[in-house]
Amino acid sequence: MSSRAGTVALESDLIDVHALVKAYFDLHPDVSIPEQRVVFGTSGHRGSSFDTAFNDDHIAATTQAIVEYRASQGVDGPLFIGRDTHGLSRPAETTALEVLVANGVRVLSDEFDGYTPTPAVSHAILKYNTAGKDAPGYSGIADGIVVTPSHNPPRDGGFKYNPPHGGPADSDATTWIANRANEIIADGLKDVKRAEASAVETYDFLGNYVDDLKNIIDLDAIRESGIRIGADPLGGASLSYWQAIAEKYGIDLTVVNAEIDPAWSFMTLDWDEKIRMDPSSPSAMASVVARRDEYDILTGNDADSDRHGIVTPDAGLMNPNHYLAVAIQYLYANRPGWREDAAIGKTLVSSSMIDLVAESLGRRLWEVPVGFKWFVPGLVDGSVGFGGEESAGASFLRFDGTVWTTDKDGIILALLASEILAKTGKTPSQHYAELVERFGAPAYERIDAAASKAQKARLAKLDGDAITADTVAGDPITLKLSKAPGNDAAIGGVKVQTADAWFAARPSGTEDVYKIYAESFKGPEHLKLVQAEAKRIVDAALAE
């Protein structure tokens, strides 16, 4: 933790946006260099033009690959495209539009040339496809592209594909797209078609999304309660959405920071002195937390609004795991229109407090690997009422139990905090305190451990049986997992459990480290022991 964490960025911390955009067009990747290849992580391809990792060539080739992929899958309708507020997002969107138009794809971009949250793109795809062939203007199955690196620093760009189900593309799709994009780049971009982006239609992402919110959040209760709400877009795409929500629904909501700046000069630095628009980080949210006494509920979103941060007067910034547990408890008790067998979805590195809440509700827990894509089928058919990740990303169903979005939606999670307060008279943090009284107080933390590329590759394929230890921090091991209990999918690492604690280890996709997630119901000191033994156990397994 840097001593500057939580302090406002200095001029020396800021990027030169003009130079960033210039590098986007001037630098050309060599895909024989691994760091310059198109690589899709859990949320698309990300990188910086300064590093020749996110440039015009990358986006032109990736878009051409998406055109070919969607054709191979029979996706012949419109493609919805949106961008966030990062400096590289507009040039990347322009590149994509030129390729899409040249290939004859019907493209729908924002009606007001504005910024578009990830959930608004997912919402648009689902609305169009659900309406079906009988709807006016139907021209085939729709999909989408979101130009965003999410909460990443200002120097980064991001580009992700959402197929017709509206959520993140699965690994089969992203692997094919990335491989084809790199092949196109290596061949000198000869297969890329480009034309002036003049034949682009528009779509009112904001209006369609905001008008529909009444079908998933009790905005009448929020308005009638008179609670004071503060919303900080953190310089992201949700700015105009929050302004529209306040106006349309007449709630006492103030946008506490309306500034858009691709250098993010107003942000407080994250733990490592980087500018990172992470609403779950106490350091990045320091300026928001400082205003906690001015509002009954204060919220934050990242640049593409797929993550949420919840700040209350009594507790400050809530740990994401804590809020997920409270949201689940509240929703399953207050959404009678959901299926009685609708499961609770969580990633296996999320808190076990969620397991205890699920058990108390009599609901099935559906535990999956990291990645929101796993929740998509359940959200589509209503068999999963809520899907959430420990990194402050989640979505849930409408009042009637039908799908809302199949990508993470930080706006509805932020609004839900106000609904909880309006309907119960208690803040989400007060509700979590009650959960602690019932079930105990888990200590949870994620740390990183050094690992070479070869070690990370071994960890990704490690089998739970390769863990030879019998105990962790003095307690017998009860379970060793390399596949998720909910869907038997490989977790890309291991998870080890005891009666009162657990740890999971997964390789980082961007750095030479592996991530250790750990939790203990015996307190912070016991958690430290679990973390230390986790590193020893995993290092031993990787050395064999």
Image (spheres, helix red, strand yellow):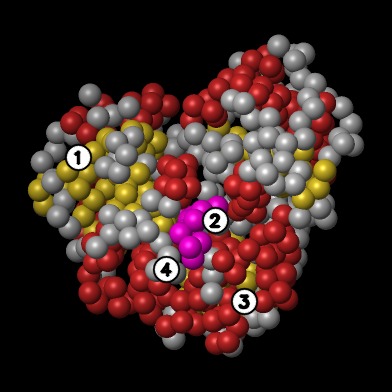
Q: Which residues are magenta?
A: 389-405
The quadrant in which the C terminus is found is: top left
Q: CA distance from mark 4 to mark 3?
A: 25 Å
Pointer 3 residue: 230
Pointer 2 residue: 404
Label disc, if present, on residue 480 of the rendered structure: 1
Position of residue 320 in the picture relative to residue 203 (left or right): left
Estimate how packed mark 4 is, as few (under 14), some (14 to 19) or many (20 or more) residues with alpha carbons within 10 Å. Answer: some
Q: How many marks are shown on the rendered structure? A: 4
* Residue 397 sits inside the magenta stretch: yes
Work out whether 174 lies above or below 111: above
Q: CA distance from mark 1 to mark 4?
A: 35 Å
Give the amino acid type for the residue marked by disc 2 in the picture: Trp
Estimate how packed mark 1 is, as few (under 14), some (14 to 19) or many (20 or more) residues with alpha carbons within 10 Å. Answer: many
**Disc nearer the start of the sequence (1/4):** 4
Give the amino acid type for the residue marked by disc 3 in the picture: Gly
Give the amino acid type for the residue marked by disc 1 in the picture: Lys
Q: Position of residue 160 (x, y in %)?
A: 62, 38
